[in-house]
Image: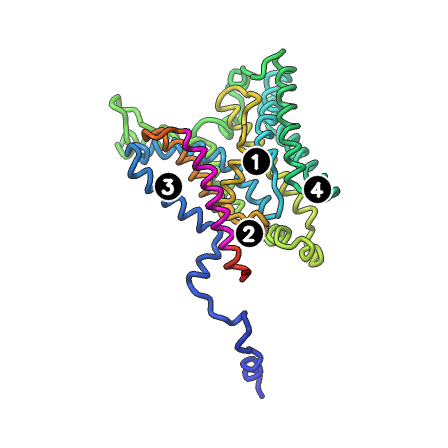
Amino acid sequence: MNASDRIKNSSAPGDERLKPVSRLSRLLRHPELGAVAGLILVTGFFLVTADPVMFNLAGLVNFLTPSAQLGIMALGAALLMVGGEFDLSIGSMVAFAGLVFGASITVLHLPLLVAVLLTLVVAGAIGAINASIVIHTGLPSFIVTLAFLFILRGLSLVGLKWATGGSTQLRGITEAVEGQALLGLFNGKVFERLFAAMAERQLIPRFDNGEAMITGIPVEIIWFVVLTGLATWVLLRTPLGNWIFASGGDPVAAKNSGVPVRKVKVGLFVLAALCAALVAVITVLGSGSTDARRGFQKEFEAIIAAVIGGCLLTGGYGTAIGAFLGSIIFGMVVIGLTYTRIDQDWYLVFLGGMLLVAVLFNNVIRKRVTGER
């Protein structure tokens, strides 16, 4: 019996590895499928009900801006969920990091770059503390980070009163950073010359006075796109990505296979905190102030965006692209309702409904992929 005969004989009819996989099954294995379907449905809804200006160039930028701010947080939350953990403190981290950043600028009078680095270091340290408590105590990350949700929100209140002499809002940041180097990395718009040239050649819509309806792309959108690309590359093209999936899918088996599960999870908690801190820096510079309610309930929106994007609550499954699309859906609904006659409070109904539908859909996908009945 030659080698080919042995291979044929060893491939028993019941060998599941050799069973043909249908196109539908291959399609269902893409975690972002639900987000794509949701985006198509939401887009179709607003094409019918909203003012057409929602989908011109200015309208697109209008809803992509809040999508990007939420999406940066959703990327960190998604990777952490793929790794099998949650962080409910990232919304409060936006407020606390905003306090650290704002106080560094207005009270300590630090240069912009130093203030940004200090903010990221503080946020990363808190993320590492969250991870250490989860890992060393065995407590669910849901409980640990829920505690830090309140701790950070309370510290933001106390810290702002200290920094301002009694107020819960810190102002004067725009004046303090004016003209500083690297400000354009975190505030303002990019490609302004390009858009000005396009307006002159009438390649983009203009107002009656000749000015372009859009003068550039907000910097947070660039951050959002770049970070999504980087996260996707890490998950799908690097050993670290395999470690993240393994740590969330079966941490015991991953550890036995040599995966540094603890280090991976610490890194993911730190990443989630850094994403929230980046959003804090961008939004504080954009508004010129910070307050104790900044980032309120954004932790839930970020996690829901990740779930809509295909992240399983059980870990080990999901993509950055899915979180990207889930965040765009959120931004489209929030801003899109203003282009219709629909009460904007329906957004909360949408929030709960999309979460329920996404969890049910992802549960079906999980059973289909794993063969569970």
The amino acid beneath tag 2 is Tyr
Specify which label sits upstream in the sequence, 3 or 2.
3
How far is the residue under mark 4 from the one under mark 2? 22 Å
Which of the pair 334/99 is nearer the observer?
334
How far is the residue under mark 3 from the one under mark 2? 24 Å
Dominant SS of magenta comes to helix
Q: Quadrant of residue 47?
A: top left
> Of tags 3 and 2, which is closer to the observer?
3
Please give the label number shown on residue 275: 1
Please give the label number shown on residue 139: 4
How far is the residue under mark 4 from the one under mark 3? 38 Å
Specify which label sits upstream in the sequence, 4 or 2.
4
The amino acid beneath tag 4 is Leu
How far is the residue under mark 2 from the one under mark 1? 20 Å
- For the residues labelled 4 and 3, say whether their Cβ atoms are less than 8 Å apart: no
The amino acid beneath tag 1 is Cys
